[in-house]
Image (cartoon, rainbow, N blue to C red):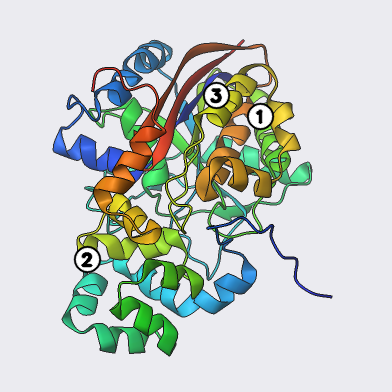
């Protein structure tokens, strides 16, 4: 059976992509951040996953307000990236995994989740930045990627409890998929930050640390927070915690923490970096 | 029945359904900045470009004034709104300063004051 060997939490902000394009990884501003990915990649390269499931939000590349899914699952054989206006060089196409994607869709619908199913979508920095952090040489052609998009731009958005349950269902779907594929799941975005309004710039590392702690031992404890609570505690875009909750939900085994760091400010955000091993 | 109102959090606008209705034209314009053609057309003739997307007068004035808080108030979503930044040479720290009445340096210092985990910097 396919096996989810671990989950990774990572920031996905455009500034990281720009820094990689410009070769700024070893500058004082960025050094601690990029150094955090060295131990993460050591584990990742040893695992050498066959399939990567990436939970991300689309910040307005493919999904605008006109037709905006709450949950969307990619089922394509290939995904393209494109210009988003941020000055990041678009990355080469990403390979998809159609069979497992369709199995996930079947299992989700069978179990009362009803996602939008996407056979052709462009993937934005929310997916490409974390992918490139795992494959800094952009040698990701060997891995197959399943993009799963969660609405974090417009309220109403899924509750943390719902994203967690969504992840759990995906985790069960993967574990019931025949084959011996090794799967890693990524929850991207966050952690605390607010880009807009007079309250722009708020970062709450105490709360971020609580989230990282609970991710390991008691993720359900985080579901007590409403998204209004999250906005209050972690800023307007702190709701990207939803992707971390979905990632954590996928880990249905015994979870231990392989690595953690929290670095702020990275652009306007607190960047959480976490490896959760799923036995 | 009335539409559910989100909790009041000072300095924070929830981008919800009614705001999305209000801001649709201006967000659609920002969304068009994904393409170089859209960015170039805006730079070439801002007024004509705003008219093409049917921005209302308040939204147009906020764009003319580079009034970020005004644009949020008029239904702009920061996720799309931020795409005007690179066109104007503004990054998200500049946006932070503009919205909080600070210089970019002051805003950066505010971010730094909440910092953690930078040891090699």
Residue marked by disc 3: A209
Q: Secondary structure at mark 2?
A: helix
Q: Is residue B27 visible?
A: yes
Residue marked by disc 2: B88
Query: Does A113 sit left or right of B69 as displayed?
Result: right
Badge 1, how many Cα within 10 Å: few under 14, some, many 20+? many
Badge 3 and badge 1 in a common chain: yes
Q: Chain of mark 3?
A: A
**Quick check: A271 above or below A257?**
below
Q: Is residue A107 visible?
A: no
Q: Secondary structure at mark 1?
A: helix
> How far, Cα to Cα, is label 1 from label 2?
41 Å
Q: Nearer the viewer, mark 3 or mark 1?
A: 3
Q: Secondary structure at mark 3?
A: helix
Q: Nearer the viewer, mark 1 or mark 2?
A: 2
> How far, Cα to Cα, is label 3 from label 1?
19 Å
Badge 1 and badge 2 in a common chain: no
Query: Does A186 sit left or right of A211 as displayed?
Result: left
Residue B121 in the image: x percent, y percent? 23, 23
Q: Chain of mark 1?
A: A
User: Which numbered circle lies on residue A183?
Assistant: none
Residue B10 in the image: x percent, y percent? 58, 57
Tell me which corner region of the image, top left, top right, bottom left or bottom right, holds residue B20. Answer: bottom right
**Quick check: B16 above or below A30?**
below
Q: Residue at x 19, y 76 (%)?
A: B43
Badge 2, how many Cα within 10 Å: few under 14, some, many 20+? few
Badge 3, how many Cα within 10 Å: few under 14, some, many 20+? some
Tell me which corner region of the image, top left, top right, bottom left or bottom right, holds residue A20. Answer: top left
> How far, Cα to Cα, is label 2 from label 3?
36 Å
Residue B105 in the image: x percent, y percent? 25, 46
Earlier residue among tags 3 and 1: 3
Residue marked by disc 1: A249
């Amino acid at each position: 059976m396919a096996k989810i060997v671990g989950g990774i939490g990572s920031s996905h902000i455009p500034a990281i992509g720009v820094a990689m394009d410009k070769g700024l990884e070893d500058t004082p501003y960025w050094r601690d951040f990029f150094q955090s990915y060295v131990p993460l990649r050591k584990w990742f390269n040893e695992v050498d996953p066959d399939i990567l499931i990436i939970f991300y939000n689309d910040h307005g590349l493919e999904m605008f307000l006109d037709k905006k899914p709450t949950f969307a699952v990619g089922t394509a054989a290939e995904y393209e990236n494109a210009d988003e206006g941020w000055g990041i060089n678009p990355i080469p196409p990403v390979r998809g995994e159609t069979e497992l994607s369709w199995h996930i869709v079947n299992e989700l619908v069978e179990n009362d989740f009803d996602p939008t199913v996407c056979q052709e979508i462009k993937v934005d920095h929310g997916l490409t930045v974390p992918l490139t952090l795992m494959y800094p040489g952009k040698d990701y052609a060997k891995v197959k990627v399943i993009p799963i998009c969660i609405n974090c731009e417009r309220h109403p958005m899924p509750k943390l409890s719902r994203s967690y349950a969504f992840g759990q269902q995906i985790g069960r779907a993967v574990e019931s998929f025949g084959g011996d594929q090794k799967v890693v799941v990524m929850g991207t975005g966050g952690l605390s930050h607010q880009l807009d309004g007079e309250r722009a710039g708020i970062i709450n590392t105490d709360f971020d640390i609580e989230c990282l702690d609970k991710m390991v031992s008691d993720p359900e404890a985080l579901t007590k927070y409403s998204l209004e609570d999250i906005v209050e505690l972690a800023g307007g875009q702190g709701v990207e915690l939803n992707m971390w909750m979905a990632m954590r939900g996928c880990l249905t085994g015994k979870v231990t923490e392989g690595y953690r760091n929290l670095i702020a400010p990275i652009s306007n955000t607190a960047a959480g970096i976490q490896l959760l091993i799923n036995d | 029945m009335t539409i559910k109102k989100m909790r009041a959090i000072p300095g924070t606008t929830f981008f919800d359904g009614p705001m999305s209705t209000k801001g649709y034209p201006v967000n659609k314009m920002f969304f068009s900045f994904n393409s170089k053609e859209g960015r170039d057309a805006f730079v070439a003739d801002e007024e004509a470009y705003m008219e093409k997307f049917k921005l209302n007068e308040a939204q147009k004035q906020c764009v003319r004034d580079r009034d970020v808080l005004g644009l949020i108030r008029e239904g702009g979503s920061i996720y799309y709104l931020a795409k005007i930044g690179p066109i104007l040479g503004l990054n998200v720290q500049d946006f932070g300063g503009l919205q909080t009445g600070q210089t970019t340096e002051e805003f950066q210092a505010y971010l730094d004051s909440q910092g953690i985990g930078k040891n090699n910097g």
